[in-house]
Image: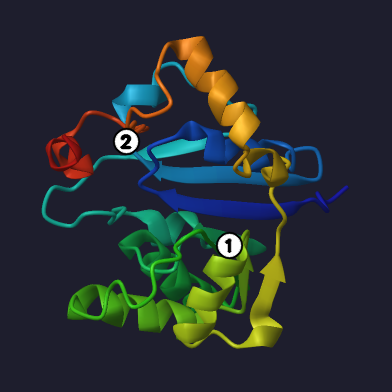
Amino acid sequence: MENSRLKINVVAGIVKNPAVFDIFQSMGNMADITIHSIENSCFYNSYKSSVPIKIYPAIKDMLGYMRGLEAELENSDIILALENCTLSSFQATRAAAKYEVPITIYSTHDQLFFYEEAPNIKAVQNDIISNSSRFIYCSPSVKSTLLADGVTEPCLTYLPPAVDINRLNFSLSKREKFRSYVGISNDQNTILFLDDLAAENNPMVLI
């Protein structure tokens, strides 16, 4: 009997936090999922996945490019790419057009006109937007950015956050409780930094 399960290829490209993969693992019982990502030894050695993850070596002078990706996407039923401004997503859209496969872009980028002064990236972004059939966003700010970048409203699909973001709203009582718990006075300025202590994240700028 012919396998009727959908074959979905997820083009993740450069990923710093493997938690982004968890959303696709839940789809594993409905379709055959393969995730394509660029090597990152910081977490791949310890991350356990229920779906296959194909790892591509990083190419120093072509950040985000995945050599051999297009051939891996040939038998896809659906291609899902992360972000609308990366070389890996650009490769995915070209492969989708070549093999006549629908492609969806999952976007989290919400910095308006961030790439206006980077013509090479802007050209890649324009190509992705022009050749993708659907865009998934998870916040109003991402939606506004996609619309400003030229994505039309009918192409947008909202994926609500999996957490209750109302719990993150400012609360004076919670602020005072937290400061008391960690031993920070109410008049002391505090900056929280959540990222790797790597040069590209500019920790010295914060300091």
- Residue 38 vs 43, above or below: the answer is below
Number of residues whose C-alpha sits closer than 10 Å to that of mark 1, classed few (under 14), some (14–19) or many (20 or more): many
Instruction: Identify the residue shown where x is 39% and y is 55%.
Output: 69
Q: Is residue 86 left or right of residue 200?
A: right
- Residue 134 vs 91, above or below: the answer is below
The percent coordinates of residue 198 (x first, y second) are: 19, 33
Give the mark, 2 or 1, whose residue is nearer the N terminus: 2
Secondary structure category for the residue under label 1: strand
Instruction: Identify the residue shown where x is 73% and y is 42%.
Output: 164
The percent coordinates of residue 118 (x first, y second) are: 19, 75
Looking at the image, how many numbered discs can be counted on the residues? 2
Q: Which mark is residue 179?
A: none
Three-letter code, disc 2: Glu
Hey, which quadrant is residue 6 in on the image? bottom right
Colour setup of the view: rainbow
Instruction: Identify the residue shown where x is 57% and y is 53%.
Output: 9
- Residue 77 vs 126, above or below: the answer is above
Placement of the C terminus among the 4 image quadrants: top left
Mark 2–mark 1 distance (CA, rounded to whole Å): 20 Å
Three-letter code, disc 1: Ile
Give whichever of 153, 15 is nearer the camera: 153
Please give the residue where the numbered disc 1 appears in the rendered image: 79
Residue 103 visible? The answer is yes
Q: Is residue 33 left or right of residue 202?
A: right
Please give the residue where the numbered disc 2 appears in the rendered image: 39
Give whichever of 56, 23 is nearer the camera: 23
Number of residues whose C-alpha sits closer than 10 Å to that of mark 2, classed few (under 14), some (14–19) or many (20 or more): some
Residue 51 visible? The answer is no
User: Which residue is most to the front?
Assistant: 187
